[in-house]
Image: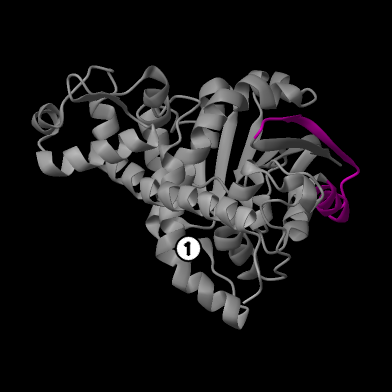
Amino acid sequence: MRAADPQKLDALVGRLVGDVGASVTGALIVLGDQLGLYKAMADGEPVTSQQLAEKTGLKERYLREWLAGQASAGYVEYDEGSDSFSLSPEQAMAFAEEDSPAFFAGAFEIIQSMWLDEPKVEEAFRNGSGLGWHEHSKCLFRGTERFFRPGYNAHLTADWIPALSGVQAKLMEGATVADVGCGHGSSTILMAQAYPKSRFHGFDYHGPSIERAREAAEKAGVGDRIVFERASAKDFPERKYDLVTMFDCLHDMGDPVGAGKHVRESLAKDGSWMIVEPFAHDHLKDNLNPVGRIFYGASTMICTPASLSQEVGLGLGAQAGEMRLRKVAMDAGFQHFRRATETPFNMVFEVRA
Protein backbone atom coordinates (compact mmCIF):
# COMPACT_ATOMS: atom_id res chain seq x y z
CA MET A 1 0.00 0.00 0.00
CA ARG A 2 1.44 3.36 -1.01
CA ALA A 3 1.70 6.15 1.52
CA ALA A 4 -1.17 8.63 1.34
CA ASP A 5 -1.43 12.30 2.19
CA PRO A 6 -3.68 12.34 5.30
CA GLN A 7 -5.36 15.63 4.38
CA LYS A 8 -6.10 14.49 0.83
CA LEU A 9 -7.39 11.18 2.16
CA ASP A 10 -9.69 12.94 4.62
CA ALA A 11 -11.01 15.15 1.84
CA LEU A 12 -11.64 12.14 -0.40
CA VAL A 13 -13.43 10.23 2.35
CA GLY A 14 -15.54 13.31 3.02
CA ARG A 15 -16.62 13.39 -0.60
CA LEU A 16 -17.39 9.68 -0.48
CA VAL A 17 -19.56 10.13 2.60
CA GLY A 18 -21.49 12.74 0.68
CA ASP A 19 -21.84 10.42 -2.31
CA VAL A 20 -23.06 7.54 -0.17
CA GLY A 21 -25.61 9.83 1.42
CA ALA A 22 -26.72 11.06 -2.00
CA SER A 23 -27.08 7.49 -3.27
CA VAL A 24 -29.19 6.45 -0.30
CA THR A 25 -31.29 9.59 -0.59
CA GLY A 26 -31.88 8.83 -4.26
CA ALA A 27 -33.65 5.62 -3.30
CA LEU A 28 -35.79 7.58 -0.82
CA ILE A 29 -36.69 10.09 -3.55
CA VAL A 30 -37.90 7.31 -5.84
CA LEU A 31 -39.88 5.85 -2.93
CA GLY A 32 -41.48 9.17 -2.04
CA ASP A 33 -42.27 9.87 -5.67
CA GLN A 34 -43.87 6.47 -6.26
CA LEU A 35 -45.91 6.67 -3.04
CA GLY A 36 -47.13 10.18 -3.81
CA LEU A 37 -45.62 11.63 -0.63
CA TYR A 38 -44.26 14.81 -2.23
CA LYS A 39 -47.59 15.53 -3.89
CA ALA A 40 -49.34 14.93 -0.56
CA MET A 41 -47.11 17.63 0.97
CA ALA A 42 -47.14 19.99 -2.02
CA ASP A 43 -49.46 22.52 -0.37
CA GLY A 44 -46.70 23.42 2.09
CA GLU A 45 -48.82 22.81 5.17
CA PRO A 46 -46.80 21.33 8.07
CA VAL A 47 -47.68 17.72 8.89
CA THR A 48 -46.54 15.25 11.51
CA SER A 49 -45.74 11.71 10.46
CA GLN A 50 -49.10 10.65 11.90
CA GLN A 51 -50.99 13.31 9.95
CA LEU A 52 -49.20 12.29 6.74
CA ALA A 53 -50.12 8.68 7.46
CA GLU A 54 -53.78 9.65 7.80
CA LYS A 55 -53.59 11.71 4.61
CA THR A 56 -51.98 8.99 2.51
CA GLY A 57 -53.20 5.77 4.11
CA LEU A 58 -49.61 4.63 4.64
CA LYS A 59 -47.98 3.30 7.80
CA GLU A 60 -46.79 5.99 10.22
CA ARG A 61 -43.61 4.27 11.34
CA TYR A 62 -42.31 4.03 7.80
CA LEU A 63 -43.24 7.64 7.10
CA ARG A 64 -41.48 8.84 10.24
CA GLU A 65 -38.21 7.32 9.07
CA TRP A 66 -38.62 8.56 5.49
CA LEU A 67 -39.35 12.10 6.65
CA ALA A 68 -36.30 12.08 8.90
CA GLY A 69 -34.13 11.00 5.99
CA GLN A 70 -35.54 13.69 3.73
CA ALA A 71 -35.06 16.34 6.40
CA SER A 72 -31.43 15.30 6.87
CA ALA A 73 -30.91 15.75 3.14
CA GLY A 74 -32.52 19.19 3.17
CA TYR A 75 -35.32 18.01 0.89
CA VAL A 76 -38.12 18.67 3.41
CA GLU A 77 -38.28 21.25 6.18
CA TYR A 78 -38.43 20.17 9.82
CA ASP A 79 -39.83 22.17 12.74
CA GLU A 80 -38.63 20.82 16.07
CA GLY A 81 -41.22 22.68 18.15
CA SER A 82 -44.19 21.02 16.45
CA ASP A 83 -42.31 17.91 15.30
CA SER A 84 -43.73 18.56 11.85
CA PHE A 85 -42.47 18.51 8.28
CA SER A 86 -43.30 20.60 5.23
CA LEU A 87 -42.22 21.32 1.67
CA SER A 88 -40.98 24.79 0.81
CA PRO A 89 -42.16 26.25 -2.54
CA GLU A 90 -38.78 25.39 -4.02
CA GLN A 91 -38.86 21.81 -2.75
CA ALA A 92 -42.38 21.39 -4.11
CA MET A 93 -41.21 22.56 -7.54
CA ALA A 94 -38.36 20.05 -7.52
CA PHE A 95 -40.25 17.01 -6.20
CA ALA A 96 -44.01 17.44 -6.53
CA GLU A 97 -44.90 19.70 -9.46
CA GLU A 98 -44.21 17.81 -12.68
CA ASP A 99 -44.86 20.84 -14.90
CA SER A 100 -42.24 22.86 -13.04
CA PRO A 101 -39.04 23.66 -14.96
CA ALA A 102 -37.14 22.53 -11.84
CA PHE A 103 -38.87 19.13 -11.46
CA PHE A 104 -36.13 16.60 -10.77
CA ALA A 105 -37.73 13.46 -9.35
CA GLY A 106 -37.75 11.73 -12.72
CA ALA A 107 -33.95 11.82 -12.86
CA PHE A 108 -33.79 9.37 -9.98
CA GLU A 109 -35.78 6.79 -11.92
CA ILE A 110 -33.01 6.88 -14.50
CA ILE A 111 -30.50 6.24 -11.73
CA GLN A 112 -32.71 3.44 -10.42
CA SER A 113 -32.44 1.75 -13.81
CA MET A 114 -28.64 2.04 -13.70
CA TRP A 115 -28.52 0.07 -10.46
CA LEU A 116 -30.99 -2.52 -11.74
CA ASP A 117 -29.12 -2.99 -15.02
CA GLU A 118 -25.57 -2.82 -13.65
CA PRO A 119 -24.99 -6.60 -14.09
CA LYS A 120 -25.88 -6.31 -17.79
CA VAL A 121 -23.48 -3.39 -18.30
CA GLU A 122 -20.78 -5.22 -16.36
CA GLU A 123 -21.10 -8.14 -18.77
CA ALA A 124 -20.88 -5.73 -21.73
CA PHE A 125 -17.63 -4.35 -20.31
CA ARG A 126 -16.23 -7.88 -20.22
CA ASN A 127 -17.28 -9.14 -23.64
CA GLY A 128 -17.49 -5.91 -25.63
CA SER A 129 -21.17 -6.29 -26.48
CA GLY A 130 -23.70 -3.49 -26.20
CA LEU A 131 -26.96 -3.04 -24.35
CA GLY A 132 -29.91 -1.69 -26.30
CA TRP A 133 -32.45 0.66 -24.79
CA HIS A 134 -35.07 -2.06 -25.12
CA GLU A 135 -32.95 -4.28 -22.84
CA HIS A 136 -33.10 -1.85 -19.92
CA SER A 137 -35.54 -1.79 -17.03
CA LYS A 138 -38.87 -0.05 -17.65
CA CYS A 139 -38.10 2.71 -15.16
CA LEU A 140 -35.46 4.06 -17.56
CA PHE A 141 -38.11 4.98 -20.14
CA ARG A 142 -40.42 6.57 -17.61
CA GLY A 143 -37.57 8.41 -15.89
CA THR A 144 -36.09 9.70 -19.15
CA GLU A 145 -39.42 11.19 -20.21
CA ARG A 146 -39.99 12.79 -16.81
CA PHE A 147 -36.42 14.11 -16.59
CA PHE A 148 -36.30 15.78 -20.01
CA ARG A 149 -39.93 16.98 -20.20
CA PRO A 150 -39.49 19.97 -17.82
CA GLY A 151 -36.67 21.33 -19.97
CA TYR A 152 -38.69 20.84 -23.12
CA ASN A 153 -41.68 22.53 -21.47
CA ALA A 154 -39.57 25.53 -20.56
CA HIS A 155 -37.49 25.93 -23.72
CA LEU A 156 -38.67 24.00 -26.78
CA THR A 157 -41.29 26.35 -28.20
CA ALA A 158 -40.26 29.45 -26.22
CA ASP A 159 -36.56 29.49 -27.09
CA TRP A 160 -35.25 26.62 -29.18
CA ILE A 161 -37.54 26.68 -32.21
CA PRO A 162 -37.51 30.52 -32.42
CA ALA A 163 -33.69 30.32 -32.52
CA LEU A 164 -33.85 28.39 -35.82
CA SER A 165 -33.85 30.36 -39.09
CA GLY A 166 -37.42 30.76 -40.35
CA VAL A 167 -38.67 27.54 -38.81
CA GLN A 168 -41.22 29.00 -36.41
CA ALA A 169 -42.96 30.89 -39.23
CA LYS A 170 -43.27 27.66 -41.22
CA LEU A 171 -44.71 25.84 -38.23
CA MET A 172 -47.25 28.57 -37.60
CA GLU A 173 -48.37 28.50 -41.22
CA GLY A 174 -48.47 24.71 -41.40
CA ALA A 175 -45.47 22.41 -41.83
CA THR A 176 -44.67 18.72 -41.80
CA VAL A 177 -42.38 17.59 -38.97
CA ALA A 178 -40.62 14.34 -38.09
CA ASP A 179 -39.59 13.83 -34.46
CA VAL A 180 -37.09 10.98 -34.60
CA GLY A 181 -36.33 9.03 -31.44
CA CYS A 182 -39.48 10.49 -29.89
CA GLY A 183 -39.72 8.07 -26.95
CA HIS A 184 -42.93 8.72 -25.04
CA GLY A 185 -43.71 11.66 -27.32
CA SER A 186 -43.31 14.62 -24.96
CA SER A 187 -41.44 16.76 -27.48
CA THR A 188 -43.82 15.84 -30.31
CA ILE A 189 -46.88 16.67 -28.25
CA LEU A 190 -45.48 20.02 -27.11
CA MET A 191 -44.85 21.05 -30.70
CA ALA A 192 -48.29 19.88 -31.80
CA GLN A 193 -49.90 21.93 -29.03
CA ALA A 194 -47.93 25.05 -29.98
CA TYR A 195 -48.40 24.78 -33.75
CA PRO A 196 -51.91 23.43 -34.48
CA LYS A 197 -51.67 24.04 -38.23
CA SER A 198 -48.69 21.71 -38.60
CA ARG A 199 -48.67 17.93 -38.80
CA PHE A 200 -46.27 15.78 -36.83
CA HIS A 201 -44.84 12.29 -37.17
CA GLY A 202 -43.12 10.70 -34.19
CA PHE A 203 -40.75 7.78 -34.75
CA ASP A 204 -39.05 5.43 -32.32
CA TYR A 205 -37.76 1.89 -32.67
CA HIS A 206 -39.15 0.92 -29.23
CA GLY A 207 -42.69 -0.39 -29.65
CA PRO A 208 -43.91 0.12 -26.05
CA SER A 209 -42.76 3.75 -26.16
CA ILE A 210 -44.75 4.35 -29.33
CA GLU A 211 -47.86 2.90 -27.68
CA ARG A 212 -47.34 5.17 -24.68
CA ALA A 213 -46.85 8.17 -26.98
CA ARG A 214 -50.13 7.48 -28.78
CA GLU A 215 -51.99 7.34 -25.49
CA ALA A 216 -50.36 10.58 -24.32
CA ALA A 217 -51.28 12.37 -27.55
CA GLU A 218 -54.92 11.38 -27.23
CA LYS A 219 -54.96 12.47 -23.61
CA ALA A 220 -53.43 15.82 -24.58
CA GLY A 221 -56.04 16.34 -27.30
CA VAL A 222 -53.59 16.39 -30.22
CA GLY A 223 -54.06 12.87 -31.54
CA ASP A 224 -55.62 14.31 -34.70
CA ARG A 225 -52.37 15.96 -35.78
CA ILE A 226 -49.74 13.45 -34.68
CA VAL A 227 -48.99 10.03 -36.12
CA PHE A 228 -46.67 7.87 -34.05
CA GLU A 229 -44.97 4.99 -35.88
CA ARG A 230 -42.39 2.40 -34.96
CA ALA A 231 -39.30 3.08 -37.08
CA SER A 232 -35.58 3.62 -36.64
CA ALA A 233 -33.57 6.73 -37.48
CA LYS A 234 -32.33 5.12 -40.69
CA ASP A 235 -35.63 3.83 -42.06
CA PHE A 236 -38.41 6.22 -41.02
CA PRO A 237 -40.68 7.10 -43.98
CA GLU A 238 -39.48 9.87 -46.28
CA ARG A 239 -42.11 12.60 -46.62
CA LYS A 240 -40.07 15.73 -47.49
CA TYR A 241 -40.29 17.16 -44.02
CA ASP A 242 -39.90 20.86 -43.34
CA LEU A 243 -38.28 20.00 -40.01
CA VAL A 244 -36.69 16.87 -38.58
CA THR A 245 -35.95 16.92 -34.86
CA MET A 246 -33.83 14.68 -32.66
CA PHE A 247 -33.98 15.32 -28.94
CA ASP A 248 -31.17 13.87 -26.81
CA CYS A 249 -30.90 10.74 -28.93
CA LEU A 250 -28.36 11.18 -31.76
CA HIS A 251 -25.49 10.13 -29.51
CA ASP A 252 -27.35 6.89 -28.66
CA MET A 253 -27.34 5.77 -32.29
CA GLY A 254 -24.86 3.22 -33.57
CA ASP A 255 -24.66 4.92 -36.96
CA PRO A 256 -25.45 8.63 -36.50
CA VAL A 257 -23.87 9.43 -39.87
CA GLY A 258 -26.19 6.96 -41.57
CA ALA A 259 -29.11 8.48 -39.68
CA GLY A 260 -28.00 11.92 -40.84
CA LYS A 261 -27.88 10.77 -44.47
CA HIS A 262 -31.44 9.50 -44.15
CA VAL A 263 -32.51 12.83 -42.65
CA ARG A 264 -30.93 14.68 -45.58
CA GLU A 265 -32.82 12.49 -48.06
CA SER A 266 -36.06 13.02 -46.11
CA LEU A 267 -35.97 16.81 -45.86
CA ALA A 268 -37.79 19.23 -48.13
CA LYS A 269 -35.56 21.45 -50.27
CA ASP A 270 -35.30 24.18 -47.64
CA GLY A 271 -35.87 21.93 -44.64
CA SER A 272 -33.98 22.00 -41.34
CA TRP A 273 -32.61 19.36 -39.00
CA MET A 274 -32.71 20.35 -35.33
CA ILE A 275 -30.37 18.37 -33.10
CA VAL A 276 -30.71 18.74 -29.32
CA GLU A 277 -27.87 17.10 -27.40
CA PRO A 278 -26.60 17.13 -23.81
CA PHE A 279 -24.41 20.15 -23.12
CA ALA A 280 -20.73 19.37 -23.48
CA HIS A 281 -17.46 21.04 -24.33
CA ASP A 282 -15.13 19.46 -26.87
CA HIS A 283 -12.38 18.50 -24.42
CA LEU A 284 -12.58 16.28 -21.35
CA LYS A 285 -10.87 18.77 -19.04
CA ASP A 286 -13.68 21.26 -19.66
CA ASN A 287 -16.39 18.72 -18.83
CA LEU A 288 -15.04 17.83 -15.39
CA ASN A 289 -17.90 19.53 -13.56
CA PRO A 290 -21.22 18.53 -11.93
CA VAL A 291 -23.16 18.43 -15.22
CA GLY A 292 -20.41 16.45 -16.92
CA ARG A 293 -20.39 14.06 -13.99
CA ILE A 294 -24.07 13.31 -14.51
CA PHE A 295 -23.81 12.87 -18.26
CA TYR A 296 -20.61 10.78 -18.22
CA GLY A 297 -22.24 8.46 -15.69
CA ALA A 298 -25.41 8.11 -17.75
CA SER A 299 -23.34 7.65 -20.88
CA THR A 300 -21.32 4.83 -19.31
CA MET A 301 -24.41 2.94 -18.17
CA ILE A 302 -26.92 3.77 -20.93
CA CYS A 303 -25.86 5.78 -23.97
CA THR A 304 -22.56 4.21 -24.98
CA PRO A 305 -23.81 0.61 -24.50
CA ALA A 306 -26.85 1.52 -26.61
CA SER A 307 -24.67 2.75 -29.47
CA LEU A 308 -22.32 -0.23 -29.24
CA SER A 309 -25.30 -2.61 -29.50
CA GLN A 310 -26.08 -1.37 -33.03
CA GLU A 311 -24.45 -1.57 -36.43
CA VAL A 312 -21.32 0.61 -36.81
CA GLY A 313 -21.35 1.30 -33.04
CA LEU A 314 -19.72 4.71 -33.24
CA GLY A 315 -20.22 5.30 -29.53
CA LEU A 316 -20.42 9.10 -29.52
CA GLY A 317 -21.44 9.18 -25.87
CA ALA A 318 -23.51 11.80 -24.07
CA GLN A 319 -20.58 14.24 -23.91
CA ALA A 320 -19.70 14.19 -27.60
CA GLY A 321 -19.33 17.97 -27.87
CA GLU A 322 -19.97 20.30 -30.79
CA MET A 323 -16.88 19.38 -32.81
CA ARG A 324 -17.77 15.68 -33.08
CA LEU A 325 -21.45 16.41 -33.71
CA ARG A 326 -20.49 18.82 -36.48
CA LYS A 327 -18.37 16.09 -38.08
CA VAL A 328 -21.33 13.70 -38.01
CA ALA A 329 -23.47 16.26 -39.86
CA MET A 330 -20.75 17.07 -42.40
CA ASP A 331 -20.06 13.37 -43.03
CA ALA A 332 -23.79 12.93 -43.65
CA GLY A 333 -23.59 15.47 -46.47
CA PHE A 334 -24.84 18.64 -44.82
CA GLN A 335 -23.14 21.96 -45.52
CA HIS A 336 -24.44 24.23 -42.77
CA PHE A 337 -24.14 23.56 -39.05
CA ARG A 338 -24.51 26.09 -36.25
CA ARG A 339 -25.23 26.20 -32.54
CA ALA A 340 -28.54 28.03 -32.39
CA THR A 341 -28.87 28.25 -28.60
CA GLU A 342 -28.08 26.41 -25.39
CA THR A 343 -29.04 25.82 -21.77
CA PRO A 344 -26.93 24.48 -18.89
CA PHE A 345 -28.12 20.99 -19.86
CA ASN A 346 -28.56 21.12 -23.64
CA MET A 347 -27.05 22.39 -26.88
CA VAL A 348 -29.37 23.08 -29.83
CA PHE A 349 -27.97 22.82 -33.36
CA GLU A 350 -29.48 23.86 -36.67
CA VAL A 351 -28.34 21.79 -39.66
CA ARG A 352 -29.11 22.48 -43.32
CA ALA A 353 -28.10 20.99 -46.64
Q: Is residue 271 above or below residue 78?
A: below
Identify the element where label 1 is drawn. helix
Decide which of 317, 153 is in the foreground and name it.
Answer: 317
Tell me the magenta residue range. 323-344
- At label 1, counting other C-alpha atoms closer than 10 Å, the crowd grade (few under 14, some 14-19, many 20 or more) is some
Quadrant the N terminus occupies? bottom right
Q: Position of residue 316 (x, y in %)?
A: 72, 58
Q: How many labels, in total?
A: 1
| Amino acid type, callout 1 | His
Asked if residue 159 lies in the magenta stretch, the reply is no
Decide which of 25, 190 is in the foreground and name it.
Answer: 25
Q: Residue at x 61, y 41 (%)?
A: 179
* Relative to 316, 80 lies left or right: left
Q: Residue at x 27, y 18 (%)?
A: 43
The residue at the far right in this view is 335
Q: Residue at x 23, y 27 (%)?
A: 40
Q: Residue at x 53, y 55 (%)?
A: 13
Q: Is residue 306 above or below residue 260?
A: below
* Colour treatment of the image: one colour
Q: Position of residue 166 (x, y in %)?
A: 78, 22
The residue at the far bottom in this view is 127
Q: Position of residue 318 (x, y in %)?
A: 66, 52
Quadrant the C terminus occupies? top right
Query: Disc 1 marks which residue?
Result: 134
Task: Say whether residue 196 is visible.
Answer: no
